[in-house]
Image (cartoon, grey):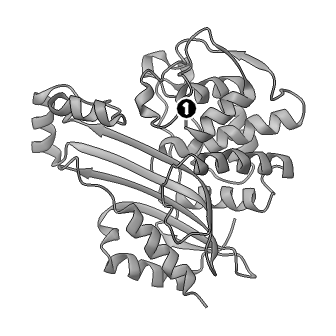
C-alpha cells in the first residue's frame, strides 16, 4: 500500500542493532502520520510471523462489514456450540470478571465482538469465524487490501477437530506491514467504511482501558491497540504449579521430561514465546502507527522480551524526527 522510507528504515535498523534487538526474530513497521506523504519504515516489515491474537482484527472487520450491510445485527443472538468453546481456564484473562463462554450459552454478536477484541476471547473468535466464514474474511478483508499471506486459515482447535478443509492447512501468519496498514485505515476511517473503522476503534479502546499494556509506556498521550501473546513451554511438567498460578501458560508441545531433554539437545531451546502488538500512538509531538511481532526460542523461560524498552526506543525516535 505504501512505499518504504528506506532512509528512515536504515536509521531505525541501526538503532535497533545498537540496542541488541536484532538478535531476536522480529518484524516492526511504523507509519508516521505527521508526514504529508505517507510512507512506511521499520525492520523486517514484510517478514511473516505467527500473529497470535492480533489476527482477530481481520475477523472483527468482516463481522462489522456484514452488520453494516444488514446481514447480521449487534443484537442478534448466537448459540455457543462445541468444539468452539476452547477457553477452559479463566486465569488466562486476569482482571476480567466476565465468565467463560461454554456450549449452550446464547449471547449477542456485540458481546462476542467485545470479548474477542477486548480480552481476546478464543471461544468468541471461533464462533465469529464460523458465523462469517474464513473464505469471506480472506476475500472481503485480506485480499481487498492486497494483504496476501495473511489469510485466516485456522481456529483455536486441535487439528482433528478442525473443519476438514483446514486440518492440514498452514498456520495463520502475518507481517508487520499488513497490520500497520490495517491500523492506518482504521485511524483514517477508511477500512471498509467509516462505520466499520469507528466500531473497531471503539472496541480496541476498551482493550486499552482494561489495563492491557503491550507496547504502551507512560510517555504516550494515548494508545489504542490489539495485542497477541502465546507461549509453548516444554518445562511445564516441571513447573506446572508456577505457570498455572501465573495464568498465562498455553501448553501445546509438552510430552514429558524426555521430550524436554530431546528438544534441548537437538534444537537448543525448550521455550517459545510470541509477543506481538500493534496500534496508534499519540505522543507530545509524534503521531504514528506501530506494528510489532516477535518470536523468541530460548532455554530460560523467565527471560522476557524487552517490550517496554523497545516502546521507549521507538517513541524517542519518533519524537526526535524532524
In this picture, is 178 found above or below 288? above
The quarter of the displayed image where residue 103 is located: top right
Q: Going 63% across and 23% down the picture, which residue do you hit?
A: 127
* Left or right: 298, with 173 as reference point: left
Please state the horizontal and vertical placement of residue 320, each as a whole percent of the image.
Answer: 54, 87
**Residue ID at (16%, 39%):** 263
Q: Which residue is situated farthest in the top direction here?
A: 104
Query: Residue sitting at 61 percent across and 35 percent down?
Result: 116
Q: Mark 1 points at which residue?
A: 121
SS of the residue at dot 1?
Answer: loop
Q: Give the tally of numbered discs.
A: 1
In this view of the protein, can residue 6 be seen by the observer? no
Q: Which residue is drawn at 17% across and 49% down?
A: 299
In the foreground, 273 or 137: 273
Q: In which quarter of the image is the N terminus?
A: bottom right
Q: For this rendering, which residue is in front, 301 or 259?
A: 301
284 up-or-down from 301: above or below:
below
Please provide percent x and percent y for residue 236. Answer: 21, 32
Dot 1, how many residues are within 10 Å of its Cα: few (below 14), some (14-19), or many (20+)? many
Query: In this rendering, would 69 be left or right of 174?
Result: right
Left or right: 43 as drawn, with respect to 101 = left
Residue 115, by quadrant, is top right
Q: Split into 4 quadrants, where in the image is the C terminus?
A: bottom right
Asked whether the viewer can see residue 150, the reply is yes
Name the residue furthest right.
70
- Residue 296, position in %: x, y? 31, 53
Q: In this view, does 172 lie to the left or right of 89?
A: right
> x%, y% of residue 207?
60, 46
Amino acid at each position: 500500500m505504501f512505499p518504504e522510507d528506506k532512509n528512515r528504515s536504515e536509521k531505525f535498523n541501526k538503532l535497533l542493532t545498537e540496542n541488541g534487538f536484532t538478535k531476536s526474530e522480529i518484524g516492526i513497521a511504523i507509519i508516521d502520520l505527521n508526514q504529508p506523504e505517507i510512507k512506511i519504515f521499520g525492520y523486517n516489515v514484510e517478514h511473516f510471523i505467527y500473529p497470535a491474537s492480533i489476527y482477530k482484527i481481520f475477523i472483527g472487520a468482516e463481522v462489522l462489514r456484514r452488520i453494516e450491510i444488514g446481514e447480521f445485527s449487534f443484537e442478534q443472538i448466537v448459540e455457543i456450540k462445541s468444539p468452539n468453546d476452547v477457553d477452559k481456564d479463566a486465569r488466562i484473562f486476569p482482571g476480567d470478571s466476565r465468565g467463560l463462554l461454554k456450549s449452550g450459552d446464547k449471547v449477542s454478536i456485540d458481546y462476542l465482538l467485545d470479548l474477542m477484541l477486548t480480552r481476546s476471547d478464543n471461544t468468541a473468535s471461533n464462533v465469529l469465524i464460523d458465523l462469517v466464514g474464513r473464505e469471506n474474511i480472506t476475500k472481503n478483508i485480506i485480499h481487498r487490501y492486497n494483504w496476501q499471506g495473511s489469510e485466516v486459515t485456522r481456529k483455536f482447535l486441535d487439528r482433528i477437530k478442525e473443519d476438514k478443509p483446514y486440518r492440514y492447512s498452514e498456520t495463520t501468519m502475518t507481517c508487520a506491514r499488513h497490520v500497520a496498514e490495517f491500523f492506518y485505515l482504521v485511524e483514517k476511517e477508511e477500512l471498509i467504511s467509516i462505520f466499520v473503522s469507528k466500531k473497531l476503534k471503539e472496541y480496541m479502546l476498551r482493550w486499552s482501558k482494561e489495563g492491557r499494556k503491550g507496547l504502551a509506556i507512560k510517555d504516550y498521550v494515548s494508545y489504542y491497540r490489539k495485542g497477541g501473546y502465546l507461549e509453548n513451554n516444554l518445562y511445564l511438567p516441571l513447573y506446572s504449579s508456577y505457570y498455572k498460578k501465573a495464568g498465562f501458560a498455553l501448553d501445546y508441545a509438552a510430552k514429558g521430561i524426555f521430550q524436554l531433554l530431546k528438544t534441548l539437545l537437538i534444537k537448543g531451546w525448550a521455550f517459545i514465546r510470541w509477543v506481538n502488538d500493534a496500534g496508534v500512538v499519540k505522543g507530545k509531538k509524534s503521531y504514528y502507527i506501530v506494528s510489532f511481532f516477535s518470536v523468541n526460542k530460548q532455554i530460560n523461560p523467565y527471560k522476557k522480551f524487552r517490550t517496554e524498552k523497545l516502546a521507549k526506543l521507538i517513541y524517542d525516535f519518533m519524537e526526535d524526527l524532524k
